[in-house]
Image (tube, rainbow, N blue to C red):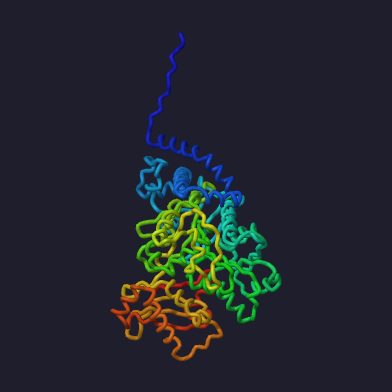
Amino acid sequence: MMPAIKRRRTALTPRSVAHALGIGRSAWLLPLDLIFKGIGLRYRWLNALFDHAPPDALSLLGKMRAERSAWRALQRVPAYRSYVRNAGVDVERLVPWNILAHLPETDKRSYIDRYPIAERCVDGRIPFRGTTIDESSGSTGSPYNWIRAERERHVAHRNISFFARHCFGTEPLVTINAFSMGAWATGFNMSLALNRNGVVKSTGPDVQKILSTLRFLGPRYRYLICGYPPFLKHLLDCGVEEGFPWASYRLHALVGGEGMVEELRDYLLERFTSVFSGYGATDIEIGMAGESPASVALRRLCRARPDVREALFGSDPRLPMIFQYNPLIHYLETTGEREIVCTISRLDVLAPRVRYNVHDEGGVLDYTQVEESLHRFGLSLSTLGRNRECFGPRGALPWTRPVLLPFLYVYGRRDETISVMGANIYPEDVETLIYRDPSLARHVHSFCLSVLNDASGTPRPHIALEVREDTKIEDGLAEQIAGRLRDGLAGLNLDYKEALGEFSAAMQPIVTLHALGQGPFAADAGRIKQRRVIKA
């Protein structure tokens, strides 16, 4: 008689069920991962996917991938697991499905500052082969170090390359990279990414090197110049002073690192055929999102049509930057304070970022949401390229058929503002007024905002202007400019207009004029990005 076989019974616990769910979901997503990786290898394949895949399906898959990434970080990243526990979350009861709704936000102060870099990596260790460390610009204080594996950098470079092809076409391109070089993430990685699209020379923000390169190669080539928006304006101005034949060259611009008002794009479009901006954060990833012909046309439409802007973005009178992004690799949410939170959905990230908040103010709109809003006005994304309200100084903007990707809109960092008598004044307001006025735009190199007490002790908005060397500073010029900026702010900013009526003396701007690198601009000499707001 055969002995009875005793079967071992395994108790079902929340943890075992969660583990099984995690394995099941990973197995189910694996075939899709392989398909997406294959499609992502070729620009035309990826473009075809975004041309035909239903936006709702892409968003759902993006969320599932983000949940898997968060689950993996919880299992394999020591710092993140500790962080979630310390936030009061019962880690043992979490399951992969809908996990993001139960996880706390992370940011520099709460997460990055509290844990060593190795503990924030997968399996708590730093692989040495192929790993690099980028440094942020330090625009919010001290620079931070960010570690990246070889595979994740490779994927980021490919995505930037594809973005450039979508915006600037496939004709041979000579790229001049004027972003700051060195440990800064954007400069080094932009050169590697755009080397896939053609010849690259990395000059950094050196005007004479750029002009020398353009003279050396001559006007027979098509050029893409990359850099911070104010620097490209400075480059054009210096070239004009030297008599450089800009009109003989075919130029495109890829800008980033900070926001850009449409008035500055207008200024750049006097010399450049097209100007597109990328969005990213060294904390998360460069190339998280990018302007497309459709998003630029949409933004310019919103500039001309406040009713369309309000239908899309609400009652905020500011005009945000508008981008499109790939929901399969970046899952974006918006907090109750209208701050953008990102989870990187890919599994090749060495130091995962889950629900990471860089404290940029803005929001997310599905492609279908934007289309439905435009239809109320008899408009469509597919026909914006023919809308005269979207045209540039030279006429119609470069146009390609829109891809069915969601839109990200960004106002900027929440703390980048000054407040006087309860009225918030934004750098974008002043920048718009400067570039809208040709007589100002020609002479102003940079500006910054602060609050300054006048002789009577009244706090007033202070606008410091850094002016070019050829500017004649005559008596009364600062007061004249202050009057023009006051009137312009009253037309742009409803809060300012109301405060001006109630507290006229306090809302009169104080304008000071400074030579290059002098006064409050002396501190910018060693900075990657210029400061726009100086806090007391």
Q: Is residue 175 left or right of residue 266?
A: right
Vertical arrangement, residue 241 with respect to residue 258, above or below: below
Residue 378 position, x and y percent, is 42, 61
Outermost top residue = 1
The answer to whether residue 172 of the structure is visible from this angle is yes
The one nearer the camera, 223 or 169, is: 169
Outermost left residue = 502
Residue at horizontal 53%, vertical 51%? Answer: 51
The answer to whether residue 209 of the structure is visible from this angle is no
Vertical arrangement, residue 510 with respect to residue 199, above or below: below
Vertical arrangement, residue 332 with respect to residue 219, above or below: above
Residue 282 position, x and y percent, is 51, 59
Residue 250 position, x and y percent, is 64, 69
State the image quarter where residue 506 is shown.
Answer: bottom left
**Tag count in the figure?**
0
Q: Is residue 195 left or right of residue 264?
A: right
Dividing the image into 4 quarters, which one contains the C terminus?
Answer: bottom left
Dividing the image into 4 quarters, which one contains the N terminus?
Answer: top left
Residue 264 position, x and y percent, is 50, 72
Vertical arrangement, residue 336 with respect to residue 230, above or below: above
The one nearer the camera, 324 or 227, is: 324
Residue at horizontal 45%, vertical 12%? Answer: 3
State the image quarter where residue 91 is shown.
Answer: top left
Outermost bottom residue = 475
Outermost front residue = 378
